[in-house]
Amino acid sequence: MARIDAFLKLGLQQGCSDIHLAVGVPPMLRLHGNLTAIRFRELGSTELQGYVEEILSENQRDRFDQGGDIDFAYVSEDGGRFRVNVYRKDTGVGATFRHIPDEVPALDKLGFPPIVKSLCDHHQGMILVTGSTGTGKSTTLAAMIDYINRNRKVNIISLEDPIEFVHSSKSSQVIQRELGTHIHSFADGVRAAMREDPDVILVGELRDEETISMAMTAAETGHLVLGTLHTTGAVKTIDRMIDALPAELREQTKAFLTQGLNAVISQVLVRTPDSRGRKAIVEIMIMTRAIAKLISTDQTHQIPSQLQTGKKLGMQMLDQALLDAIEAKEIDPDHAVTFAQDKSLFRRFVTDTSLMPKFEP
């Protein structure tokens, strides 16, 4: 058994989401959003280097020795599955392990609005799931893929870095391919997928111009494309898509968004009232003629007003979703206010007086 497995086992026993190992500090666990050190000595450089090298393949070790960070999936001796990032910093090696649950959570269990299931029934176009790092985008996408897998007879090709949740084919066929193992880049993966009779293509991250362009092409040619961006909110997501491609393609990109983008789901993770868990709260934008016109005329700043009036279509603003969850006693109001755009709406719910200055004009 690799020595690092002892820390991973302890993390799983505590119910943490992440285990952090870095030189000069004890191992750290992220539990319900907070980072806490375990009772252990500070890790030394040679010691941690040895821990990490025990779980690297020859190919991974070569890539790491060449100076790059590496991402991969690791299964511990106890069967726990983790997404791993190994990196170097000024004092030596560091590693972060994100626990991946054995079972893919259902959309109902995640508490998402019914519109998300309806979006999964689309046969073409693009759906973007966005949010900052660690907000559960991979979990949301896995739940959407699982819903399609259970309810439709289609060919699903999932391109990931690395493979996290493992899907078994049910009503659908699910093919999972990993960056660095099966494909050289996401763009190459999308290009290859389009020759493999896909119905649904999941792109783990729309991280560069070529990948975004290929994903747009796939969505335009009759496929349902699911992808992620590290953006917060519908407006920033639209602006990011437009700015990601060269200026000469700006009008072409806007035309795609107005016709090929089905929806943007932007999420945050907020602590529950008992601080023993976190819940995903989402902003949802559904493409309509009115929003399409705002995009085509460079008035994306007016999209929030459409989200407010589009409730019957399944749209919701993040602030309203946060307020609804607070009133249902599903989330901690003091944590929720940190994500709010208009913090004054939350004044009557907040109990931590240190947050009151945030409400000042």
Image (cartoon, rainbow, N blue to C red):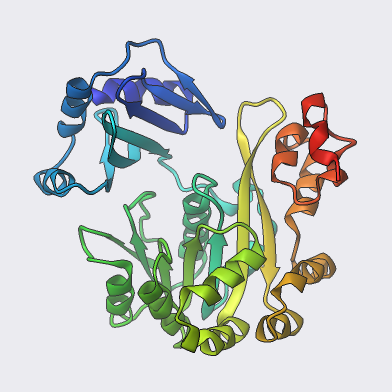
- Please tell me in which quadrant of the rendered image residue 195 appears: bottom left
Quarter placement of the N terminus: top left
Q: Closest to the observer: 25 or 351?
A: 25
Please tell me whether residue 63 is drawn above or below residue 192 in the rendered image. Answer: above
Q: Residue at x 39, y 49 (%)?
A: 165
Q: In this view of the protein, can residue 78 be seen by the observer?
A: yes
From the top left corner, tell me how far across and down residue 261 is, in percent. 58, 78
From the top left corner, tell me how far across and down residue 244 is, in percent. 47, 73
Residue positioned most to the right: 348
Q: Residue at x 49, y 21 (%)?
A: 36
Q: In this view of the protein, can residue 117 be seen by the observer?
A: no
Q: Closest to the observer: 318 or 108?
A: 318
Q: Is residue 233 left or right of residue 134?
A: right
Give the tally of numbered discs: 0
Q: Is residue 224 left or right of residue 72?
A: right
Q: Residue at x 43, y 21 (%)?
A: 13
Q: Is residue 350 left or right of residue 275?
A: right
- Please tell me in which quadrant of the rendered image residue 198 appears: bottom left
Please tell me whether residue 144 is drawn above or below residue 249 in the rendered image. Answer: above
